[in-house]
Amino acid sequence: MSGRRQLSLNFFIYPDGHHEAAWRHRDSASDRILDVTYYQELARRAEAHKFDAVFFADGPALADNVRYAQRFRLEPITLLTAIASATSRIGLIATASTTYTEPYNLARLFASLDHISGGRAGWNIVTTSSPQAAQNFGLPEHPPHHERYERAREYLDVITRLWDSWEDDALVNDPISGIFADTGKIHAINHVGKHFRVRGPLNISRTPQGRPVYVQAGSSDDGRAFAARFAEAIFTAHQTLASAQEFYADIKRQARAFDRSPDQIKILPGISPFIGSTQLEADRLQEEFNDLIQPEYSLTQLRQMLGLDLSGFNLDDPFPRHLIDTGSAHGVASRFKLVVDIVDREKPTLRRLVQRLAGARGHWVIAGPPEKIADNIQTWFENGAADGFNVMPPWLPGGFDIFAEQVVPILRRRGLFRHDYAGKTLRDHYGLDRPASVFSNSIQAIA
């Protein structure tokens, strides 16, 4: 492979696909959403096409609109452990919340996944936007946005030190000398902070990657600052090239302010493509899915993004822009802004807006023949908007197969995507350095 910069491609697996009505489509595999072999098959397909990683979203509460859509999923770290046994090279990224987990437990789970997979684990770090999660964990209410990020920053400090608490050569495992571990290279972290008190060390040795790859998906001001400080890959939503370019430049600039190399952060917008042999065929395919939309579900999604109940409005009237309170972001702050931008730019009817959001919850939905999809990916990649993409097929499994078999070969012919893996770990695939332990050359060790 040449030294030319290469795209990173993740396969974001939503059980039926990313269009909200995918589970109703005749080609959906909705009867297999709890079948582990289904996900193993999908991951093997992505590995065969040399994708960087499979990516799983998650949340610690049942969504309140499950009546109209598939809104639950298997726990991702457990699922990815099963996928690890069925694959050998593809990266494995799981979502877990800093608000509703504890650092020590999560450090063990991800360290185990990284060991089991031979260094392929990634952690999608979220603070959780769903307010209904609080009462599942004994809290009277969901913590405010800024408090969740404050906790997340301390959480990252704790969990990083736990993963680093064994230096790389602390595990000796020498039957002749009788020394299993060099305790001078195993470190208590002795953390005492506002949110956590953790002694450490972790009860498992340092992993093949040193630490799992840190992935992050928030695009609010707090989310951007957090990503620039900690993230090694960023999953983000944009509708336009200009918006993606602004985000890309801002993250890279903030990373420099934290004395980080911008090249050590991969920015990966979501893309959900409807692909046909012609533009007309692709448009018809997208309309086929849009015809399956249930307004009750769509309006619930919109209410969560905007804080507006529009259930009594005529879907074919212009969207009531005057009702949006731009001084207060509801739900996910970055999604609030994204929806407002669509309304201001396109001035859609309410029906058209819910169709725009149905494809992938605010991520970039594009319809066209394979060359058009490849052209747009190349434009974003070569013009300061993306280092790669989280591919979000509208339905599964066919939506992924079409992209992998028709678009990926075009990207390869253009020299934009690998023909084979160059390494074995997720860090290798992304071109990320393996971090040194924060305790390297330290004299502090466990008693």
Image (cartoon, rainbow, N blue to C red):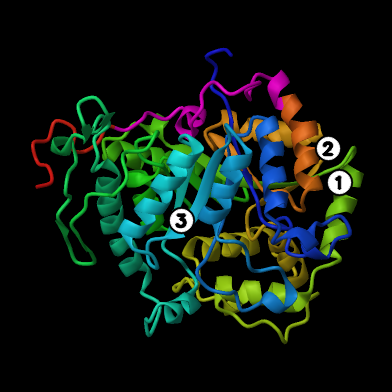
Q: Quadrant of residue 187?
A: top left
Amino acid found under the numbered disc labelled 2: Pro
Q: Position of residue 10 (x, y in %)?
A: 60, 40
Any magenta on residue 366?
A: no
Which residue is tagged 1? 282
For label 1, count other residues whose C-alpha is less than 10 Å away and answer few (under 14), some (14-19) or many (20+): many
Q: Secondary structure at mark 1?
A: helix
Q: Are marks 1 and 3 in contact (CB under 8 Å)?
A: no
Identified by mark 3, the residue type is Gly
Residue 115 rendering spot, x and y as whole percentages = 43, 39
Asked whether the viewer can see residue 233, the reply is no
Count all numbered tags in the image, as a single digit: 3
Q: Is residue 229 above or below residue 349?
A: above
Which mark sits nearer the N-terminus, 1 or 3? Answer: 3
The range drawn in magenta is 411-435
Q: Quadrant of residue 74?
A: bottom right
Task: Give the residue drawn at x 79%, y 32%.
Answer: 405
Which residue is depicted at the point 52% across and 65% down? 59
Q: Residue 355: name its quadrant.
A: bottom right
Q: Which residue is mark 2?
A: 369
